[in-house]
Amino acid sequence: MKVTIDKFVLSIICVIIIAYFFPEWGIASSKIPIDTISAIGISLIFFFYGLKLNPTQLKAGLKNWKLHLLVQASTFLMFPLLVLLLRPFIQNEAQETIWLAFFFLAALPSTVSSSVVMVSIAKGNIPAAIFNASISGIIGIAITPLWMGLFVNDAQTDFDFTAIYLKLIVQIILPVILGLLLQRFLGAFVHKHSSKLTLFDKSIILLIIYKSFSESFDSGMFSSVSFLDLLLLFAGVFVLFVVTFLLTGFIGEKMKFNKEDQITAQFCGTKKSLVHGTVFSKILFGNMTSIGIILLPLVLFHALQLLIISSVASKWAKRDGIN
């Protein structure tokens, strides 16, 4: 089986390397207004997200409520609870930061585009995938900050719910609502140019990742992270993914889902959105010097989920009785 690395994953690796050698462009004292550019970019990302949402499809998708319940429970309950099991083993501040990074990953919503694409390849329930991936992003706007608010204060971070939700409203919720209101007028235009808009989304994500890692490299946050630590992080991400993937599949079988619904449950319920993660990290953690470390498990998870899910999707697409 030929294994290919996603081009966007390669772009992320390149951006992190650039941040390592040239962190001065992304730090607070830089003359390049990355914060302003990324703030405008975030609002545009979610404006386009609102334009892409189809109210008719979302309404029709409500019928398969058992599948939706499993996907959202896996995304917002199973993931965080699994990571919470490790909290009693934290012994120092460095471990606290790593655990917080994993918990942030666990509290994020599912991703839309890759979930739907992979479900389509595996010949799963595509309408349900569209509904769950879309609604997950909306739910995450409320749930992710609530989960993080339980523990971010412990990490000595300024976590003001009022300020955070104000930023969420201004930068995310209002653009989504505006996009929904204009969907009937601009929806066709957005779908026609979806590839260009996807490129724009990825460019903003790369910009945020660059700034986050630049600040962490400049402050020396990664000086204590060894290659062995990176391998352990990757192992932790791998275990988290595999456990949730198998648990979601097991529960789907017990709920007597057909194969199409089970594929959708496992693919959508185990994905985590890099878009939401980078955006939320900027809003929730502000200018924390450890923000690069906070994003590291998410970056690793993003690469891993694409690699594993694409392989599984290709295999399941060849199952008997499906053309």
Image: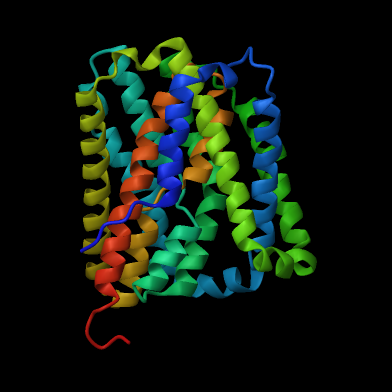
Residue 137: where, in percent of width, then height? 53, 51
Is residue 242 shown above or below 260? above
Count the marks: how many? 0
* Displayed quadrant of residue 321: bottom left
Residue 115: where, in percent of width, then height? 43, 61
The answer to which of 35 and 246 lies nearer the viewer is: 35
* Displayed quadrant of residue 193: bottom right
The answer to which of 282 and 302 lies nearer the viewer is: 302
Asked if residue 153 can be seen in this view, the reply is: no
Q: Quadrant of the N terminus?
A: bottom left
Asked if residue 10 can be seen in this view, the reply is: yes
Q: Quadrant of the C terminus?
A: bottom left
Give the side of residue 307 with respect to residue 172, left or right: left
> Looking at the image, which residue is at 65% across and 40% down?
42
Residue 196: where, in percent of width, then height? 63, 57
Is residue 106 shown above or below 34? below
> Looking at the image, which residue is at 46% across and 65% down?
116
Give the side of residue 127 with respect to residue 320, left or right: right
Give the side of residue 75 with respect to residue 1, left or right: right
Which scheme is used to colour this image of the protein? Answer: rainbow
Residue 319: where, in percent of width, then height? 23, 80
